[in-house]
Amino acid sequence: MHGQRGAGAAKSRVAAVCDPFLVLAAVADGAVSAQAEPTTPTPTQCDLLAASAFDKARPANVPGIPSGKIDAARAIQACREAIKQDPSPRIYYQLGRAMEAGRDSGGAFRYYKYAAERGHAHAQNQLGYLAYVQGDYSSAIMWFQKAVAQGDADAEANLGSAYQKGQGVAPDLSKAAHWYQQSADQNDAYGQYELALMYQYGRGVPQNTGLAVTLLKQAAMQGMAEAQKQLASIETSASPQATDSQPRRYSGQETTGIASADGPVAGCLNSSSDQSPEAVTTACTRLLAEIHEREVAGTLSPDTRKVVHVVFFQRARGYVTESRYNDALSDINEAIRLAKMISGQESAIVEYRGLRGCLLSNMSRDLDLAISDLDVAVRGDKASQDRKYAASAFECRGNAYLAKGLPSRAVQDFSKSLELQPGNQEVLNLLASAQRKTDTPQRPGSPGTMHTFICRIPGNVEPWVITADPGQKSFGIEYRTEDTKMTLPRNSGHLW
């Protein structure tokens, strides 16, 4: 599943996720569609700074720029100016890309939606993608289908992914292979990669390792790291399939009710440490397809229904290992949703939220949700019992605070992580980076030492930083945000 993409053909790490609850909107009367635009319009600065290489509507002489390399400030200004001269869906889509690069999720969503409603195919795909990763599958499918009708290769691959995993549509591996083929025929690396896996393991198509290798080479030549890794695994192993091994129960979760699906259960819920991530995710996908078939047939047992969330969680873990972070985020959202419907799953939900928080933090996306999830994780039972888990949770939350421009809080969390797991060089580097970004000492001292406090002021989205010298009998307090600085008069200590 992919929306905007970065360098090469690797799937993107979208910077921010917007409100996914999209509604069906009719194309505005008289709106100019992407297809109605000239094929080679004169490029603007907006095109040069924010066009996507995967957008067919971009000027033919503009190569496009990866989302991770957009200079957000310059691109936003250039696209706002371009709209005055050419208020076309393409320019609005590019303004959305610039907004997303600048971590303005609300602005990005607004302009993507404006362009999508006026027929811009790649904006339609992007809205579908944003809905998909938040679990709003019906809206995702609706937007993918609109984009597919215009031949958008990304949307074709994304629709294939939805059919493969049975999200928003009934699982259908034949349809998944069809849409991956449509995407691959347009030389889309993601479509080529996913279709290659279908052929490698015989999912929805006859098994054909030779064709799988050909497709992987095509994707690898475009710089797709996942394809390069998979190609290497085939070339160095005569049998890329999962090996049989002694099963171990996953996380103590009960699997009663699906014991008849021994193959998928052993490969997914009872996966062994020597199984490849691909083998785990494949087994979990097969297991979910079997569960869906029983659901449709009315033969799904109550016990099975209670553990479906575990299957999604385990597949999410496999996707993380494969660096398929967007797919992992989609599955972990589904695991949380399902677990909340079952009593007695509080501990599981806390663990699931911890994984989601770390994913969002590492992707620098939806940071408020990441921090909220990790707040729960660091206070959970697992964090109190597992020092390594707690250290990772504090590290992830520190990363989120650092990305939000709150280095003082990041310093606190990185320090806690190091207390739990001393000598972690990666965390030491993060701590040093956070300390460089804060302009106040981080250790207590005598009068004359400035202390930093973080307070959430009603009516403000971001917490304000308060600095004060406790050695003064009456002191001033400085409230700082990224764009505001105000010093209160002395004798304001009662505000503490």
Image (spheres, helix red, strand yellow):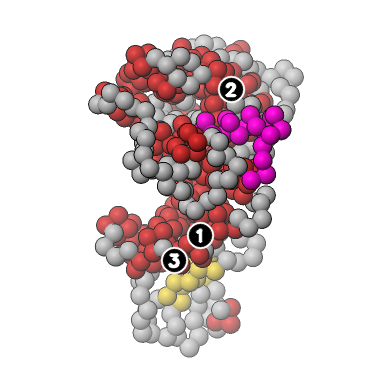
Q: Earlier in the sequence, mark 3 or mark 1?
A: 1
Q: In the image, which disc is placed on residue 377?
A: 1
Q: In the image, which disc is placed on residue 430?
A: none
Q: Earlier in the sequence, mark 1 or mark 2?
A: 2
Residue 419 in the image: state x and y as whole percent. Answer: 34, 68
Q: In the image, which disc is placed on residue 385?
A: 3
Q: Residue at horizontal 54%, vertical 26%? A: 164
| 427 vs 16, nearest the viewer | 427
Question: Which type of secondary structure does the marked residue at label 1 adopt?
Answer: helix
In-image side of 101 versus 291 (left or right): left
Residue 327 in the image: state x and y as whole percent. Answer: 50, 36
**Residue at the extreme left:** 236
Question: Which type of secondary structure does the marked residue at label 3 adopt?
Answer: helix
Magenta range is 284-303
Q: Earlier in the sequence, mark 3 or mark 2?
A: 2
Q: Residue at horizontal 48%, vertical 21%? A: 203
Q: Residue beneath label 2, please?
A: 172
Residue 482 in the image: state x and y as whole percent. Answer: 49, 57
Distance from the alpha carbon under mark 1 to that under mark 2? 36 Å
Q: Are marks 3 and 1 in contact (CB under 8 Å)?
A: no
**Which residue type does callout 3 highlight?**
Gln
